[in-house]
Image (cartoon, rainbow, N blue to C red):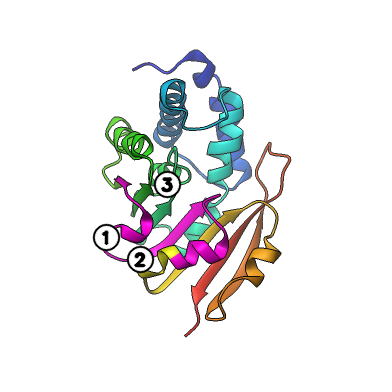
Amino acid sequence: MPRPEAVDTLRPRLVEAAQALGLALSAEQVDTLLDDLALLQRWNGTYNLTAVREPAQMLTQHLVDCLAVLPPLRRHLGEHRVARILDVGSGGGLPGIVIAATCPSYDVTCVDTVGKKAAFIRQAAGELGLPQLHGEHARVEQLKAAPFDLVTSRAFASLADFVRLTRQHLKPGGVWMAMKGKPPDAEQAELPPDIDVFHVEPLNVPGLDAERCLVWMRPRT
């Protein structure tokens, strides 16, 4: 399906934001991300996947916001390493679809308790040609899956609930990467003593006037 003009005209902004983040996206990857934005906008009209409606705002607040995690993610996992990632409470595939579209060596499973959101992920995997992207409709604590190298979330829950609900899905040596706004000092204080917050990494999201950070955690050994 052709992309709406309102989405297609955002290509220069997407390319500029990626360059500002130090990301060398291929033309095909840019196309895939714009197709994802168009698909999200189309489904949003019926299923209310996100409160953000205007394509330019969706680009900055969703796609570019998620692109900002790629440099730290690649540094940790290795850009070309085969790795398994779990995106918890993925909603409209954020950040799962963005990761799958730009990091083909990563196998990404998005899980959500809302059936229409999991269905959107599966539809996106087919339409965007991303065989390494999977959508699961389940509560994460009940998900049946092989363990993951990295478990991530974007505004899913408190840090304590995030690690409690997903711990069984973490491989030995695996890590959590929680996307947050301001550094969540109060949430960190509520973590159990056997969880090590080994890095709180500030993120600069091009075009977004708001604080963002990644909270990196792992079980203490």
Q: Estimate the spatial distance between the alpha carbons at disc 2 and disc 1, rounded to whole Å.
A: 8 Å
Hey, what amino acid is under mark 3?
Answer: Gly
Q: Is residue 165 above or below residue 195?
A: above
Residue nearest the observer in this picture, 39 or 26: 39
Which residue, given by chain and number where applicable, does mark 1 sit on?
145
Q: Is residue 221 above or below residue 131?
A: below
Which image quarter is the N terminus in? top left
Q: Position of residue 165 (x, y in %)?
A: 43, 63
Q: Earlier in the sequence, mark 3 or mark 2?
A: 3
- Of helix, strand and loop, which one carries label 3? helix
Residue 38 visible: yes
Q: Position of residue 33 (x, y in %)?
A: 45, 33
Range of magenta residues = 135-164
Which residue, given by chain and number where applicable, does mark 3 sit on?
96
Residue at 42%, 31% in the rendered image? 36
Q: Estimate the spatial distance between the alpha carbons at disc 3 and disc 2, rounded to whole Å.
A: 16 Å
209 to the left or right of 27: right
Q: Is residue 129 above or below residue 191?
A: above
Which residue, given by chain and number where applicable, does mark 2 sit on?
169
For the residues labelled 2 and 1, say whether their Cβ atoms are less than 8 Å apart.
yes
Hey, what amino acid is under mark 2?
Answer: His
